[in-house]
Amino acid sequence: MKASPPLILCLSSTLAIAIATGSHSGVSALTHPGCAPIRVTHADSVDPTTPLWPGARFTEQDRRRAVVRGLRFIYKTAQDPHNFAEHGHDYLWCYDTTARAMKDEAVRSMAAEIGQKIARRWRQANPRVPPGASADTITVLVFGSDSADGLGVRDDAIKEEIRRAAARFSPKDFLEFDPDTEPPPSDVPEDCARCGTENPRGSGFCSRCKARLTMRSRYDVWSEALIITWSGDRYGVKLGASYADVLKWLPVMRPYRGREGGANREFVDIVYAVTHLVYTLNDYSMYRLAPAWLPQEFEFLKSSLKESIAAGNPDMLGEFMDTLRSFGLTEDDPLIQTGMNYLLSHQHADGSWGNMRRLRYHPTWTAIDGLSQYCWRGQGLSMPDLKPLLPR
């Protein structure tokens, strides 16, 4: 495989050098289509040698360098054709949310420029809905198209194709259950660990190789349904059900059990369900949430953050920090300080975070989010009419 070029060669030289040196005064930043003008104190007005908080080991420049190195690593992995074919929609989501939400103007510009390159490549690879497309394929097309549109690389023709194709499927095709009639179930099997076969709901043994199947937790099913329906509503294509249909089961998913010393096998799925509840409600870090709107979720996140550090899991830690920031926690809070110290101390030499035997773009993405500050658009919800569905 041909080695991908360093990111600095893919950016305007002025912007790349400015970001790398921790100063971007005078840089003409790209404006992300989804990010309105924001009145913030830009990073170039902050001395890069300023500690992140009084007495901190790390500085603002350390933070920015870590973020830039992480974005470079993610971009490098996206150059691999196999990675891009498998995860191109997720790479787009990463750069789209970074480009529209980050407070650091230079980082936003960097993410927008990379994201637009990736979006054009993704559009070329996905010009139409394939004949006989499955519900999963349509979901991926919605994920990628919504992010590509957000990055300014629009394709209105394929949107209508996706809408027509999606109408052929039921809620169970997209979500594994029908949220209009039942809560997230516990009898959806994982794909067979032995042969990879997808089996019908309720199956205890693989239809192909007869191996015993493991069931997905109801939190995993719910989390996926939140993401799918929120994305469909945001893009304007119904993926089996509405986000409100899935969100209404929030009271059923409470209360949330902690790790319980390893006894709770659902703990990881609970974490990601709670963090993605927050993400979908705050438009992926665009709005602050009032702790009073989600009191149980807020307390769960605060009480469980250190479990991710004990487990050496930067992916989970990044999501804890990212979502807690939306409730108002800042670098003044000891939990955020603990998380930032961990992330800044555990970045790999190649700019990534996570298990070196794996792809690592996702833990790197969430670590970047955990380290970053946001250009909040005030307190609110991604869909304002959802507030009555948030029981305290």
Image (tube, rainbow, N blue to C red):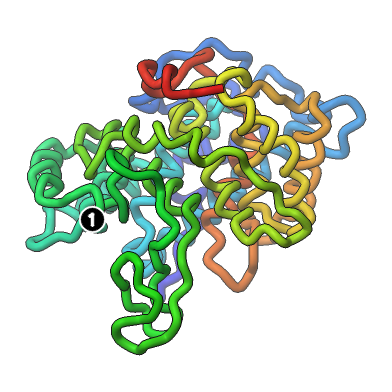
- Please state the horizontal and vertical placement of residue 153, each as a whole percent of the image: 25, 38
Q: Quadrant of the C terminus?
A: top right
Foreground pick, 241 / 275: 241
* Residue 222 seen in render: yes
Foreground pick, 353 / 25: 353
Farthest-out residue, right? 55
Residue type at mark 1?
Asp
Compared with residue 77, is residue 250 higher up or lower down, i.e. above or below?
above
- Please state the horizontal and vertical placement of residue 257, each as a whole percent of the image: 66, 47
The quarter of the displayed image where residue 303 is located: top right
Foreground pick, 224 / 32: 224
- Please state the horizontal and vertical placement of residue 203, each as a whole percent of the image: 35, 73
Compared with residue 230, is residue 185 higher up or lower down, i.e. above or below?
below
What residue is rendered at 21% in x and 32% in y? Answer: 236
Compared with residue 128, is residue 381 higher up or lower down, i.e. above or below?
above
What residue is rendered at 39% in x and 43% in y? Answer: 227
In the rendered picture of this protein, how many numbered marks are placed on residues?
1
Badge 1 density bin: few <14, some 14–19, many ≥20, Cα 10 Å: some
What residue is rendered at 61% in x and 18% in y? Answer: 292
Q: Which residue is mark 1?
A: 173
